[in-house]
């Protein structure tokens, strides 16, 4: 009986050791830069996203899919949940002061999708960066990471 | 073009938050009690033209007056390429062509003419008939499009189209225009600049033709008897290419 208890205790210790750090999926703001194992999520433009952050993390694909069918089939061009609108606010600017494309690991979509190992096909057809436009002040390249623009907590 | 926004149906707010949905439903119900239902829906959807769904009250069409179209001019072709981000890969056989100038010649008389040909936006499009996935479709307002989300690249529609209007993308593309997504493995064709039409603007080719002083292309609503295009097709003789096929294309030609 003692052996059994010891085994269970050891197992519990091992599980805590494995699950502890891995349980935190998203870095708290300000901690991302110090822990490179977690996804480094670039900040978006403006005060808030179109929906609450937690909702967007879980449901952005549903919003995009719904909007895509409305737009393609019926010509409803609400910008709020469009991929174009996502990219306009969440553009990441590279060292050349131009928005990076999906080929760059620092691209907003890639920052999470690489981490979660979920491959997306959107950018086989869709532009992965805004067409043009002035460089917003909070999207200037900070040089914090090689090939990466300013990210959460990088200052 | 204002007729597009004249009569709209409720398109709904694309949201998945159940609370939001029920709130909107409640709003509609409350308003519906006090007002006529039609008025309520109109009131909500009128907030923005971009909000409006395409309706079958409109049939977009184009009248191309070849008497004003110069043989050597290809402003419409280059404007289309610029607007939709079309680039060549040095392979003229397979490079995308949404609009092209086709040279025709009467062997009897030697008379030759070059006419712009693009997707003719048929009322009964054969490309839609043959599509196995429903990706090739006709929008309510008569614009024939490819839904690239469901296109499997089989190219049946390219075979079916009597106007050779469709192209297949053979190369991996980068930096497409945000308003004109296009990618390898899908079929594409003239969209009548649907992104412009949805914001009450003219197709790029029509704009370019008018800017260059040609003014050969006239775009408008064939369903609206008061539109310029309806008046002109009612007044002057116009032709459809391969009218014998009975597809009733939305693109018409004068002086062909």
Image: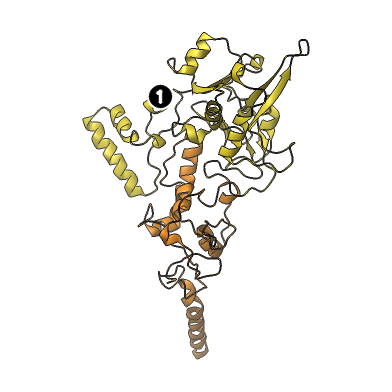
Chain colours: A orange, B yellow
Q: Residue furthest bottom?
A: A2
Q: Residue at the location (31% across, 40% down)?
A: B25
B11 or B50: which is nearer to us?
Answer: B50
Q: Residue B36: give x, y in percent of width and height.
A: 26, 27
Percent position of residue A116, x then y: 53, 63
Q: Name the residue located 62 percent from the left edge and 45 percent from the top edge.
A: B183
For mark 1, what is the residue?
Answer: B3
Q: Is residue A70 left or right of residue B177?
A: left
- Left/right placement of residue B28 relative to residue B122 reads left
Q: Quadrant of residue B7?
A: top left
Q: Is residue B1 above or below residue B255?
A: below
Number of marks in picture: 1
Viewer-nearest residue: B238 or A80: B238
Assess disc 1: are there few (<14), some (14-19) or many (≥20) residues with their C-alpha within 10 Å of its C-alpha: some
Residue A4 lies, in percent from the top left, at: 51, 86
Q: Quadrant of the C terminus of chain B?
A: top right
Farthest residue to the front: give it. Answer: B213
Residue B34 lies, with reference to residue B105, above or below; the image says below
Q: Quadrant of the N terminus of chain B?
A: top left
Observer able to see residue B134:
no
Please report, as a chain letter, where disc 1 is located. Answer: B
Q: Is residue B24 above or below residue B113?
A: below
Task: Report the residue that reaches farthest toward the left.
Answer: B34
Secondary structure category for the residue under label 1: helix
Residue B149, above or below B226:
below
Residue B148 image position (x, y, % from top left): 59, 40
Residue at image point 44% right, 58% down: A57
């Amino acid at each position: 009986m003692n052996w059994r208890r010891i085994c269970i205790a050891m197992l519990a210790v091992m599980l805590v050791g494995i699950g502890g750090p891995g349980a935190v999926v998203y870095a708290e703001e300000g901690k991302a830069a110090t822990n490179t194992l977690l996804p480094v999520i670039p900040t978006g433009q403006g005060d808030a996203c179109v929906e609450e952050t937690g909702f967007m993390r879980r449901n952005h694909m549903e919003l995009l899919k719904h909007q895509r069918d409305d737009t393609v089939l019926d010509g409803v061009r609400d910008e709020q949940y469009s991929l174009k609108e996502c990219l306009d606010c969440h553009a990441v600017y590279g060292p050349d002061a131009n928005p990076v494309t999906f080929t760059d690991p620092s691209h907003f979509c890639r920052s999470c999708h690489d981490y979660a190992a979920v491959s997306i096909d959107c950018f086989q057809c869709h532009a992965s960066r805004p067409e043009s436009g002035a460089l917003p002040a909070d999207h200037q390249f900070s040089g914090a990471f090689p090939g990466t623009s300013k990210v959460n907590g990088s200052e | 073009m204002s007729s597009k926004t004249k009569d709209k149906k409720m398109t709904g707010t694309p949201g998945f938050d159940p609370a939001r949905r029920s709130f909107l439903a409640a709003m509609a119900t409350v308003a519906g009690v006090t007002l006529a239902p039609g008025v309520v829906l109109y009131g909500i959807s009128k907030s923005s033209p971009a909000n409006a769904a395409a309706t079958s009250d409109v049939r977009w069409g184009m009248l191309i007056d070849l008497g004003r179209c110069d043989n050597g001019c290809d402003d419409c072709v280059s404007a289309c390429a610029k607007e939709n981000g079309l680039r060549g890969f040095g392979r003229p056989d397979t490079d995308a062509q949404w609009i092209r100038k086709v040279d025709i010649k009467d062997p009897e008389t030697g008379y030759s003419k070059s006419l712009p040909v693009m997707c003719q936006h048929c009322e009964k499009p054969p490309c839609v008939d043959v599509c196995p996935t429903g990706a090739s479709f006709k929008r309510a307002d008569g614009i024939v499009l490819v839904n690239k989300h469901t296109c499997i690249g089989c190219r049946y529609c390219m075979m079916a189209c009597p106007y050779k209007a469709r192209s297949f993308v053979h190369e991996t593309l980068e930096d497409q225009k945000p308003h004109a997504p296009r990618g390898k493995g899908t079929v594409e064709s003239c969209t009548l600049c649907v992104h412009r039409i949805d914001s009450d603007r003219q197709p790029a080719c029509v704009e370019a033709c008018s800017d260059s002083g040609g003014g050969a292309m006239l775009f408008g609503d064939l369903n609206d008897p008061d539109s310029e295009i309806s008046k002109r097709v009612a007044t002057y003789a116009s032709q459809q290419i391969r009218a014998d096929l009975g597809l009733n294309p939305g693109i018409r030609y004068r002086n062909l």
